[in-house]
Structures are given as structure tokens and as C-alpha cells.
Amino acid sequence: MTTRILIVEDDRELSRILQMALQHTGYEALVASNGLEGLRLFHDLRPELVVLDIALPLMDGMTVCKRIRDFSDVPILMMTAHAITEQDIAAGLDAGADEFLIKPIRQVEFQARVKALLRRYHGQQKSAETDEIQGYLDDYLSVDLNGRHVLVKGEDMRLTPTEYRLLELFIKRQGQVLTFQQILEQVWGFEYHNEYHYPRIYVSHLRRKIEPDYRMPTYIHNEYGIGYRFVSQIETKG
């Protein structure tokens, strides 16, 4: 079955270029020119990935992203014409985005990001079937890797596919020091080997979702200059 991708972009020339690039690669590419149309097409056609501009008429990209995240965890690749700061990335992560690309879009990078996002999304759906570690459970945090279900203080915590993959990696490798390079390769893929800022930004945001106090992390510890380590609270309380 052909993978279906939705492009929500009001620049008709850019959306046509992206659509043709995706179709040439073998994807089914759908196009919407405003936020409301994009949200309607998402509901009707259920694509496996969304390419979403931030600045859209009728409904902005951040709002569309939040609406999609209310009921779906498909990867969302956001595009912006402006230089992006870490604060912008944090706002996008809060809305539920997985990745950002800055316009003008380079075809090679665009294709690589789409491929990597789909690979992670499909991979995490299958990974629980073969791994021995099926989750994590203590009085505060519960992670069911089979059901892809995360509870914090007994309440559902929705993670984006990228955030979930990051937490999954930490749980499966708990107690081990993971270098920045290992995290990049195993969570994002080889296409991201130069994105050294990604682990720091995404770990910071994941901490805000799962830690009792993100300023003094309990689970995800820094190994300064090296990477991060997940510390099980089951062992420390025993």
C-alpha cells in the first residue's frame, strides 16, 4: 500500500514542487492550501505523515498541529520561512511537531527527513514485538512499550513519535551512558549525524513531560560532554 503524505502549504508553487518530489519517490502526496482544509483532509484521508507550514491562512500551523495531536501520533514535519530559535522549537514541540525545516527547502534534505520520520514511525510500531524489555513502572512513571502508553502520576501523557522513540531508547538502555552520537543515530537516523543540538533540545522537552521536576531530573541524567543516562527509580528505592 502506498504511503500517503499530506502537504499543508499556502505557497502553491512550493506545494507543487514538494508534491512532485514525493510522488517521484513513490509516495501518494495530497495538498491543502490553508489550515482548515488541511485539518479536513487529515480527518478524511488519514495520512501517515504531515508536512505543515507554520504561517497558514484560516488556521495557523501550530493550531493545526495541536488539533492533529488530539487524536493522532503521526509524524509532523513543520516548515517555516524564518530563522528558528530553540524557543521556536520548544513551542513547536509543545504543539506536537516532530521536526522543523527552514525555507527555502532543499530537496535532498526534505526527502531525507521524510524518509527518516516514516522509518522511525513505522519502526516504533513494530519494535515492541521483538524486544525483551517491555516497559518501565514505578510509583510516578509508567511506560508500556507494547501498547505505546505513557502515564505520569497515573495520567496519560501524549508524546510525539520522536519523543516516544527517545524515551523508548532510554528505557531499553537504562543505566547505560548513551553518547550524543548514539542517540542521534538510534532515534533520528544517520541523516542527522551533524544535528548535535537535537538531543539537548528534545531531552529538555521530554523532561518537562515526564520528570517530577525538570530542573532537577530524576530519570534522565546528564553525562556532561558525553550524553545522557536513564536512571531507574525502582533500583534506587529498593
Image (tube, rainbow, N blue to C red):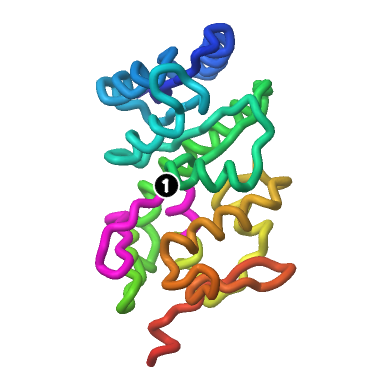
Rendering coords of residue 78 (x, y %) = 52, 31
Q: Which residue is mark 1?
A: 160
Residue 27, above or below 191 = above
The answer to whether residue 31 of the structure is visible from this angle is no
Which of these two is toward me, 27 or 12?
Answer: 12
**Image quadrant where one finds the N terminus:** top left
**Residue 178 percent location from the top left of the image:** 61, 66
Left or right: 236, with 20 as reference point? left
- 103 to 121, vertically: above or below: above
Q: Is residue 23 left or right of residue 44?
A: right
Name the residue at 64% across, 59% down.
Answer: 182
* In the foreground, 82 or 192: 82
Please state if 68 lies on the left or on the right of 92 as rendered: left
Residue at 56 percent across and 59 percent down: it is 204
Tell me where the magenta segment starts and ends, as one range. 147-167
At a point 50% along the width and 41% down the height, the residue shown is: 92
Residue 231 image position (x, y, % from top left): 50, 77
Q: Quadrant of the C terminus?
A: bottom left
Is residue 89 part of the magenta span, yes or no? no
Quarter occupied by residue 71: top left
Mark 1 belongs to which amino acid?
A: Thr
Q: Magenta span has 155?
A: yes
| 205 lies above or below 125 | below
Quarter of the view holding residue 134: bottom left
- Secondary structure under badge 1? loop
The reply to whether residue 125 is visible in this rendering is yes
Residue 201, percent across and down? 60, 54
How many neighbours does mark 1 have within 10 angstroms: few (below 14), some (14-19), or many (20 or more)? many
Q: Residue at x 27, y 25 (%)?
A: 43
Label total for image: 1
